[in-house]
Amino acid sequence: MAINKGGEALIREWKGVIVEGVLGTGISDPPRGLSLTAITACNVASAEGGARILAIDLPSGLNHVTGEAPGECIRATWTLNLHMLKEGQLEETAVPYVGELWSAETALGFNTFGDDLTPKFVAFYKDGPIQRVW
């Protein structure tokens, strides 16, 4: 859903599942502008309206290395990690933002990280392509 006139209100009133992917990895500054508006609206929908949030790869606003949020950050019900777990997802400071952490197997993980990590990937995903981390 686009954030435009009325879009923020629609998000705030949503009662279902919000699939969130506002920002990617690599942030170090607080979200601002439309990103901040979208993150805030999602969090309000969750806290006040009962919506649940599925963050794709990493909750928007969370630093993937430190696990800290330099500003407003999505407070996900679930996070579906892609490729490889990010160090910041596993930090104690990230728990209120990440929610339940799940990881999905992708070819990128196997192809990018090569033979050194392939046995670890195979072992982790032995029971299926999506695994619960916590």
Image (tube, helix red, strand yellow):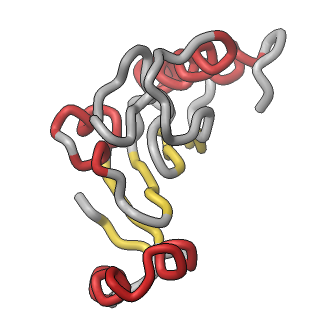
**Whether residue 125 is situated above or below residue 16 in the rendered picture:** below
**Measuring 65% from the left and 23% from the top, which residue is drawn there?**
11
**Whether residue 10 is situated above or below residue 95 in the rendered picture:** above
**Whether residue 83 is situated above or below residue 112 in the rendered picture:** above
In front here: 8 or 106? 106
**Measuring 69% from the left and 15% from the top, which residue is drawn there?**
34
**Measuring 47% from the left and 18% from the top, which residue is drawn there?**
29
Residue 28 shown left or right of residue 13 in the figure = left
The quarter of the rendered structure image containing the N terminus is top right
Number of dots carrying numbers: 0
In front here: 73 or 1? 73
Q: Residue furthest left?
A: 92
Residue 27 shown left or right of residue 32 in the figure = left
**Whether residue 112 is situated above or below residue 128 in the rendered picture:** above
Q: Quadrant of residue 47?
A: top left
**Measuring 63% from the left and 20% from the top, which residue is drawn there?**
35
Q: Position of residue 118 (x, y in %)?
A: 37, 86
Q: Position of residue 53 (x, y in %)?
A: 49, 39
Residue 88 shown left or right of residue 17 in the figure = left
